[in-house]
Amino acid sequence: MGPPTILGRRKMPKRTVVLVDGQNFKKNLQTFAFRTAPDQRAFRLDEKHFDWGKFFRAMIAKFDAATGVEHQLLRVYWYAADTITPFISEPRRAADIARDCRLRNPSLSPDDVMRLAETWYRRERDNFIRAREDVYEQLQRRYDFLEFKFVGQYDVRPFVPYLIERDPSGRVTYLGTRQGEKGVDVGIATDMIAKLPFYDVAILVSGDADFIPAVKHVKDHLRWVYQFSVAKGVPPRINYLSPWLKSITDLFGFFDERELLRDYLIRLDTTNRWTIKPDPYIPEAVMEVIDRRVAELEAQRN
């Protein structure tokens, strides 16, 4: 259901803000993974591989067409965690993990566990910092309508092992647990409510059911809330990746997989130069696999 018809002859543009739940959206994007060979590691898409100028302009155009009302995009707020949990040494947990490992392969001492847990944590911390400096800051400079907002914390648990295994060479792989971002959804909900006087339409790029109270509050104050998602497949065989708010928002929009891969990835232009060069860019071999997937989806639509 779209927004109510605007009274009067002149339809004023609706002041519109977009709020992106960064972690939720990244997980959706990384669902699109491509292998150039069966034994190769999958190449996963993420934020740096898309032309967000085209993406958000097309999103707004979809809602214009669906409602017959012009939406004036004021800003896109993209939310990500501000900090990562600090490393805290846990000798008792390390001893428990080592004791469990004695019953299976690999056998580890408490000191081994401490070293492996700290190494994993430092790698996670470095990746967290690199994403903020090398990805988010570059995107912030590239798109003047986009603002990254850093709230909450990225919660990792070095002493809650997700995987411990030893390969034939004797090398041990140790992975802690990524709990995910905490407090980011609260930051988004707070902004939705605090900015109420300054917008007519809020577009949520998320499917998190935690936003339901905030959505209801905004609607109770006579503002409209839309939801936007991406999807696997094409109609009628389609799987929306964030469908959980559809029933309470005023309008739902999406890009299907064909649209997403065909229209919004950063590609080489006809002069064989990158219009916007992501770092790292999508390898040519991966792009060939993507284009075969697009052709397959086009055939399904026909």
Image (cartoon, rainbow, N blue to C red):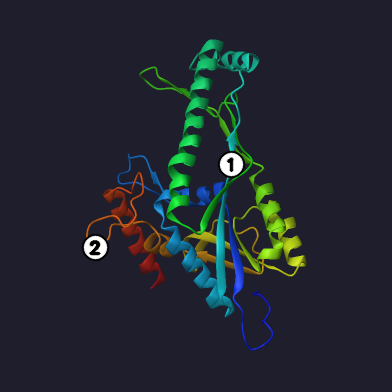
For the point 47% across and 68% down, which residue is it? Answer: 58
In three-dimensional space, the C-alpha distance between marks 1 and 2, rounded to whole angstroms, equals 38 Å
* On screen, residue 12 above or below 117: below
Which amino acid, by three-letter code, is at mark 2? Answer: Thr
For the point 27% across and 50% down, which residue is it? Answer: 284
Which amino acid, by three-letter code, is at mark 1? Answer: Ala
Residue receiving disc 1: 81
Q: Looking at the rendered structure, which numbered label has been put on residue 64?
A: none
Question: Position of 38 compared to 196: left or right?
Answer: left
In the rendered structure, which disc, 1 or 2, sits on the residue that comes first in sequence?
A: 1
| Mark 1 element type | loop
Question: Position of 156 compared to 260: left or right?
Answer: right
| Mark 2 element type | loop
Q: In which quarter of the image is the C terminus?
A: bottom left
Residue receiving disc 2: 270
Q: Quadrant of the N terminus?
A: bottom right
Q: Nearer the viewer, residue 243 or 66?
A: 66
Disc 1 + disc 2, Cβ < 8 Å: no
For the point 51% across and 51% down, which residue is it? Answer: 28
For the point 27% across and 60% down, which residue is it? Answer: 269
Where's residue 40, x and y in %? 33, 40
